[in-house]
Image (cartoon, rainbow, N blue to C red):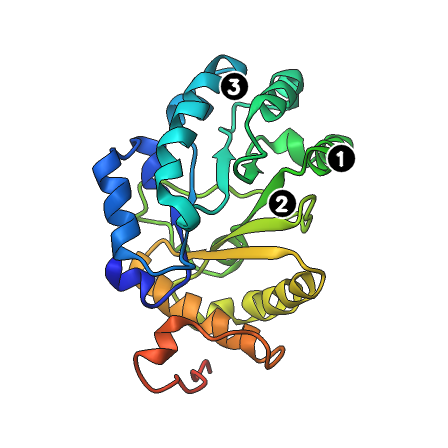
Amino acid sequence: MRLYSRRLTAVEGNTTFYATPDQTTVQRWVAETPPGFKFCLKLPRAVTHQGLLMPRISQSIAFLERMQGLGDRLGPCFAQLPPSYSPEQLEDLVGFLNAFPRERIDLALEVRHADWFREADARNLEAILSDLGVGRVLLDTRPIYECPDNPQLTSERKKPQLPLQLSTPANFSLIRYISHPDLAMNQPYLSRWAEQVYGWLQQGIQVYFFVHCPIEAHSPTNARHFQQLLEQQAAEIPPLPWNLLEPPPTQLALF
């Protein structure tokens, strides 16, 4: 974490999906990261992947209590719902979102059932999230499905192929960009994302942009390239801490 936090400004905490860290681990995360660094943590699967959400609200609050130990390092948390959780469970979802202590921490939602992306259900969900100030997790898997090869061929956990909805119902948003291992394949997607993110930043929307890759060794390079594209949008975009550790990178040759 010490190495990561001296190069990037936030981390998407997937490990909390599988196990809640103990107090010692939380304290170590604080000690190893600089002020201003943010942890965006996924709610445990014991909360989001065990059927209805409302019976798990006490577990959500207990998780939040533990994570309060991060102090100012704590960014938004997010709930990733399984593909089995559909608009038929809307009443349960609304109850959970109302009961979650959003005044203490920002919460974002990622849905994966295909019906959430139908026009009527998508519009209804957008209105609910907007009313409650709940953010949206935007999952972009286009690079790994629209390119000619299959970079997920050897991946154990494949990302879903779902429509991308560019919506920001709250004043913050989490973007999970699943990149292609070949940097050049990402260029048209990342160029459009840089324009979109800059537009949101101009509106005062806080954006957390996380870059994944089926071959994770490529994620840092792809993430850094996106930062370069974003900096080209305007001079006021702050550079990554990474740039302070070595001479600023030159524009990467893509073609």
Which amino acid lies under the numbered mark 2 shown in the image of this protein? Pro
Residue shown at 59% from the left, 82% from the top: 235
**Nearer to us in this view, 225 or 109:** 109
Q: Residue 128: x and y, percent?
A: 72, 31
Earlier sequence position, callout 3 versus callout 2? 3
Q: CA distance from mark 1 to mark 3?
A: 20 Å
Residue that label 3 marks: 53
Q: Residue 217: x and y, percent?
A: 29, 62
Q: CA distance from mark 2 to mark 1?
A: 18 Å
How packed mark 2 is, by other alpha carbons closer than 10 Å (few <14, some 14-19, many 20 or more), is some
How packed mark 1 is, by other alpha carbons closer than 10 Å (few <14, some 14-19, many 20 or more), is few
Which amino acid lies under the numbered mark 3 shown in the image of this protein? Leu
Q: Secondary structure at mark 1?
A: helix
> Looking at the picture, does residue 246 appear above or below residue 80?
below
**Nearer to us in this view, 247 or 84:** 247
> Looking at the picture, does residue 62 appear above or below residue 243?
above
Q: Residue 41: x and y, percent?
A: 41, 41
Residue shown at 35% from the left, 73% from the top: 242
The quarter of the displayed image where residue 7 is located: bottom left
* Image-based side of 58 in relation to 146, left or right: left
Residue that label 1 marks: 127
